[in-house]
Structures are given as C-alpha cells and as structure tokens.
Image: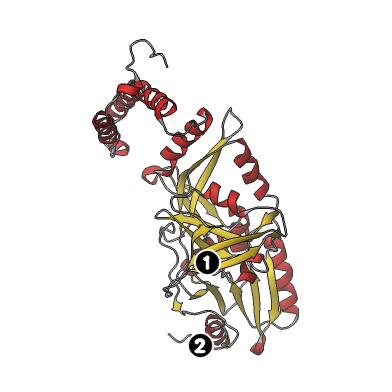
Amino acid sequence: MKPRPGRFVPGLLTVSALVLAAVASVTVFAAPAIEEQQQPAAKEADAVRDRRFLESKTDLFLDVVDLVRAEYVDEVPIDSLFAGALNGMLRSLDPYSQYLDEAAYRELKADTEGEFGGLGLEVSVKGGFLHVISPLDDTPAARAGLLAGDTIVKIDGETTREITLAEAVKRMRGVPGTVIRLTVMREGESQLREIPVTRDRIVVRSIKESKLLEGGVGYVRISAFQENSAADLEKALDSLDAQGMKGLILDVRNNSGGLLSAAKEVAELFVPEGKLIVSTRGRGGKKEVLFVSKNPSPRRISPLVLVADRGSASGSEILAGALQDHKLAVVVGEKTFGKVSVQTLVPLPDGGAVRLTTSKYYTPNGRLLHEVGITPDFPVQGQETASAKDPALERALEIARGPLKS
C-alpha cells in the first residue's frame, strides 16, 4: 500500500500513538457543553473551532481505515467500515440514534404499513443489552411466553451484547413458519431460558378487546396506536354507552406505542379543548412543540381508570400522563417503560438514512417522560396467570365501581 503524500504509512503507527490520539479527540469534543448559554459570537467562534478540529482529524480517520484494511486479520469491505464508523458515533449518543443503510431504511419504512413478518416483539437496547419492552397481543412472542422486562442475551445462539436495534430486528425477522431460538434472562430467575418462537405474519389490531364488566364498568384494551385508533375507540365507547356503561377501564399494558398523532387523538377524546396533551422540547429545552386538544366536546367518563405496566411505552405514556395530570383518570399497575423521545428520520444521498433523537416528551405538568416513565397512582405488581386472576385489573375494577381507596 502506497502512503498518500504528507501521510504516514499506517503499518508504522504505534499502539501508544493511537491511544493518545483517541484520548485527545475525546477531550476536545467534551468541551462545548454549555453552548446554549453562550453569546452568538462565542458560539460562532466555537463552531469555527470545531470545524477546524474535524478537518484536522479527517486524515487521522483515513489513516485508521488504511491501517485496518492493510493489517486487520480478515479482509473487511470498505462500505462495512464506513457504516461501522457512522453507527459507532451515533450509538455513543443513545440506543435509538442510528445509521441505516439502504436495505435497513427500506425495512424501517415497511414497519409503518401495519403488517410484517416476525415475532411481534417490541425491543429496546439499554446498557448494551437487548430488552423486551412488550410482546404484542396474539403474536408468536406472546404465545411463546415472552414477557415485558425479559433480557434477550442470545438469538439463535449468537450473543446480543452491544447489538444495535436495527441488527436485532433484522435477525429476528424471517420467513413465516421458521423457528428462532431466543435465550432469555428473566428477573428473579437464576437460570437462562431458551424459548423457541415460530415466526408469523404480524398484523396489529389497535383495539384488542371491548366489553362490559360486572357493575356496568366498560373495558377497552388498546394494543397499539395506529391511524384509526381514535375512531375505533369512539365506536367501542358508543357501543358500551348503549349498554349502560357507568365507568371505564382503559388497558394499555404491553402497548409499546405507535403513531404520536394517534396517541394524541385518543387523548383528545377525553382532554377538553385548549388543554395541553403533551409537549416536546429539543436541546436545552428549546424548539418546544405543544400538542393541545381541539375537542370542544370531550367525553366525560367517571370513574376513568387507566391500567399500565412496564411494557407500556411511548404513546401509552403520553396518554397516561395527559389523563393523570388533568385528573381525568387514575393510573393503576406498574411504572411504565420510559421510552418517550422523538427520533427524526433524515434520508441520505446514498439511499440510507440517519435516525437521530432530537427532542423529548413532557406531560402537561412538565414531567419528563423519557427514561422516567409514569408512576401509577395505585401500584399493583403481578400479571394474570393460569392459576390466578389479574391483580391490576381486579384493582382497577374495584376503583371503577366505588370510591377511591389508597
């Protein structure tokens, strides 16, 4: 390999030099931590300084690429090195920011169509591990016994340590009818579980169940927030009203979210006109966006109880926060997952895209939701089993039928 003019030969670079270069770059990048408090002139000077720094390190980056291509034990395609560099930078920010190549971007766009092949499992990456947010109702994952809070340590025998969300989704999807083996670590258990799951076509229904319980209490389970969720919920509530509904339980357990617009529209059915439903704030609390109810005739249902668990995330937390802050409902169950941030998808010229976290959600009272979640008014642990009733639903029904008791 011929050295480029003015550059060193990568094969001659010492390990100590590489370490020092890495430490230097970390130190310089850590400096602009208070840029939102600086005056425009100072911020402009910082921008110029940072640009010069990046330009000075471009050659260093290319030198490391040359070193890997010349000396690494296995041959690595240049496009894989490039994608790895971008993903390494974005993964250092949070588990949700990532680079998507053209194929991964196509897969992500397919998710919005509402039907896809896979397991029916919502996952997240925390601390370098793959965690289950929730299994979707009536899907292979739910039927196989996977639970919210499970940690998936292996997929088909291969470790998931430091896996990206995009890679996890890619490995779990496949042809319907094929079997995938997930090795799971479950809270409170000392032994790992190996759970075989048969892939299937996944069709998510927004309103999973609607019925009248004893005492005239209505019950609606919302499995996901989709385009028609608010309209479907209205139909369900009209039907329950016709049956003499006297109170309502909204169940969003294992509802990992969906469309922000749909969650807002569902909340708008209950939140009065002019009242805040949720807000988003960008860096330093700026770029605030307010989502305000425009419904002049909201439904007034009392008692209204929302049941949530640690599998409730994103849109479920937005709904729970709005109803709780406006004292329209009480929340029963477990603390929610705490995954409520805004990822902006930016298409790139190469056909891929960058998904970047650009803001976080706050409840009407200004409570941060991301990595915090919603704390229930009436905490209830435990899930329904073959030998025991559903403790959270039993508590919700008790509250919906009579005066509140803490």
Q: Nearer the viewer, mark 2 or mark 1?
A: 1
The tag earlier along the polypeptide, 2 or 1, is: 1
In x, y percent, where is residue 197?
63, 64
In the image, taking residue 187 as reference, residue 144 lies left or right, namely right
Please, which residue is most extreme toward the front here?
Answer: 73
User: Could you say which disc has been placed on residue 89 in the image?
Assistant: none
Q: Nearer the viewer, residue 53 or 22?
A: 22
- From the viewer's perspective, is residue 310 above or below residue 342? below
In x, y percent, where is residue 78?
51, 28
Local packing at callout 2 (Cα closer than 10 Å; few below 14, some 14-19, many 20+) is: few
Does dot 1 land on a helix, a strand or a loop? loop
In the image, taking residue 28 as reference, residue 270 lies left or right, namely right
Q: Does the rendering let one see residue 44?
A: yes
Determine the residue positioned at 47% across, 73% down. Answer: 334
Residue type for callout 2: Pro
Determine the residue positioned at 72% across, 60% down. Answer: 177
In the image, taking residue 270 as reference, residue 19 lies left or right, namely left
In x, y percent, where is residue 283?
39, 43
Q: CA distance from mark 2 to mark 1?
A: 28 Å
User: Could you say which disc has been placed on residue 311 in the image?
Assistant: 1
Residue type for callout 1: Gly
Q: Does the rendering let one see residue 273?
A: no
Q: Nearer the viewer, residue 71 or 48?
A: 71
Q: Which residue is mark 2?
A: 403
Does dot 2 land on a helix, a strand or a loop? loop
Local packing at callout 1 (Cα closer than 10 Å; few below 14, some 14-19, many 20+) is: many
- From the viewer's perspective, is residue 124 above or below residue 252? above
In x, y percent, where is residue 311?
52, 66
Determine the residue positioned at 43% across, 34% down. Answer: 73
Task: Quarter of the image for the C terminus: give it.
Answer: bottom left
